[in-house]
Image: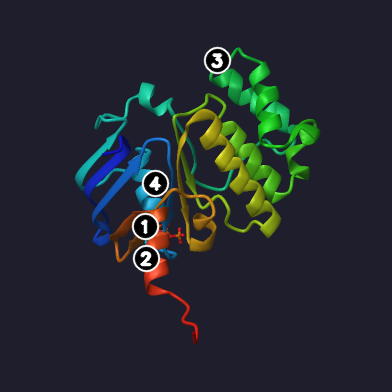
């Protein structure tokens, strides 16, 4: 049995009289890239906000790093991008990251260089953010989210609205972060084919609950078995 970074059992969330999540289970193995797949309105953002402690849930149990408490120490180990990434538009990419680093009382200035290399924005670090494309802005947001090398990264639809080249760059970036820092990455998306190219596990959320969680190997087996292309010979 693999060590789990996130384990949710029977998580239920109501917005007033509307039930958004109904007894949802989720298990995310340590060190994996986990793709949370579901159609618009399936409840992905609701689940991610609950995991981050941004909104409360009504019933169930959630354990992150093997405890049900989400204190500051634990939140420090989690990086996230939940909504459209906002920056100071009139400041440069570097100034934006430095403000965040100062806020975190981060003293290692080499880390800023490392981050710009990693997110492939070294040549744009002195440009104002208002000149950044959507893909560059997303990469800067990832840089900000991984400044303190989080053990867990939670990303809500980070490839939404990116062009194919931007999606490819993001995919490679997530794989690098996962490989180099051992960061467990939870990514929501409605594009299964994209998750197939980067995730180790996927969870399918539909009708307010987790329909199925499986490893990519299991998914490949299922696809091979049930979607075999028949030939005449
Ligand atoms: P999308 O990709 O469209 O954001 P999603 O899978 O992230 O979809 P959620 O945003 O979690 O889905 O929404 C799940 C359901 O809960 C939807 O029917 C949505 O309308 C509803 N919902 C979300 N936030 C609220 C809220 N604050 N108040 C009431 N209903 C809400």
Q: Residue furthest front?
A: 233
Q: Nearer the viewer, mark 2 or mark 4?
A: 2
The residue that disc 3 covers is: 105
The residue drawn where x is 71% and y is 30% is: 117
Identify the residue at image location x=43%, y=25%: 76
Residue topped by disc 2: 222
Q: Toward which corner of the image does residue 31 lie, by quadrant?
A: top left
Contact check, label 4 and label 1, Cβ < 8 Å: no
- What secondary structure is found at the residue carrying circle 4? helix
Q: Is mark 2 within 8 Å of ligand 1?
A: no
Q: CA distance from mark 2 to mark 3?
A: 48 Å
Q: Which comes sooner in the sequence, label 1 or label 3? A: 3
Residue 164 in the figure: left or right of residue 186 = right
- Residue for badge 1: 218
Image-quarter location of ligand 1: bottom left
Q: How far is mark 4 from mark 1, CA to CA? A: 24 Å
Q: CA distance from mark 2 to mark 1?
A: 6 Å
Task: Identify the residue at image location x=65%, y=28%.
Answer: 115
Pointer 2 or 4: first along the chain: 4
Residue in view at x 26 percent, y 46 percent:
57
Label 3 SS: loop
Residue 150 vs residue 129, the one in the foreground: 150
Q: CA distance from mark 2 to mark 4?
A: 27 Å
Secondary structure beneath dot 2 equals helix
User: Would you call the spot at circle 4 few (<14 residues within 10 Å), some (14-19), or many (20 or more)?
Assistant: many
| Direction from residue 40 to residue 19 in the image, left or right | left
Label 4 sits on residue? 48
Q: Position of residue 118 (x, y in %)?
A: 66, 33
């Amino acid at each position: 049995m693999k060590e789990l970074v996130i384990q949710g059992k029977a998580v239920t969330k109501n917005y007033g009289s509307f039930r958004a999540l109904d007894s949802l289970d989720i298990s995310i193995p340590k060190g994996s890239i986990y793709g949370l797949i579901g159609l618009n309105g399936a409840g992905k953002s609701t689940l991610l906000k609950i995991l981050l402690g941004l909104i409360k849930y009504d019933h169930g149990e959630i354990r992150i790093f093997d405890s049900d408490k989400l204190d500051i120490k634990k939140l420090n180990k989690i990086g996230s991008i939940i909504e459209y990434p906002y920056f100071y538009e009139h400041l440069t990419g570097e100034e934006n990251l430095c403000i965040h680093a100062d806020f975190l009382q981060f003293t290692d200035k080499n880390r800023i260089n490392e981050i710009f290399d990693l997110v492939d924005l070294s040549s744009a670090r002195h440009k104002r953010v208002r000149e950044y494309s959507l893909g560059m802005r997303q990469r800067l947001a990832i840089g900000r989210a991984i400044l303190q090398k989080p053990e867990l990264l939670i990303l809500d639809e980070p490839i939404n609205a990116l062009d194919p080249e931007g999606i490819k760059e993001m995919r490679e970036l997530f794989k690098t972060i996962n490989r180099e820092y051992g960061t467990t990455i939870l990514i929501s998306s409605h594009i299964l084919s994209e998750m197939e190219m980067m995730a180790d596990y996927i969870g399918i959320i539909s009708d307010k609950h987790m329909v199925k969680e499986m490893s990519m190997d299991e998914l490949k087996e299922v696809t091979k078995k049930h979607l075999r292309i028949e030939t005449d010979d």
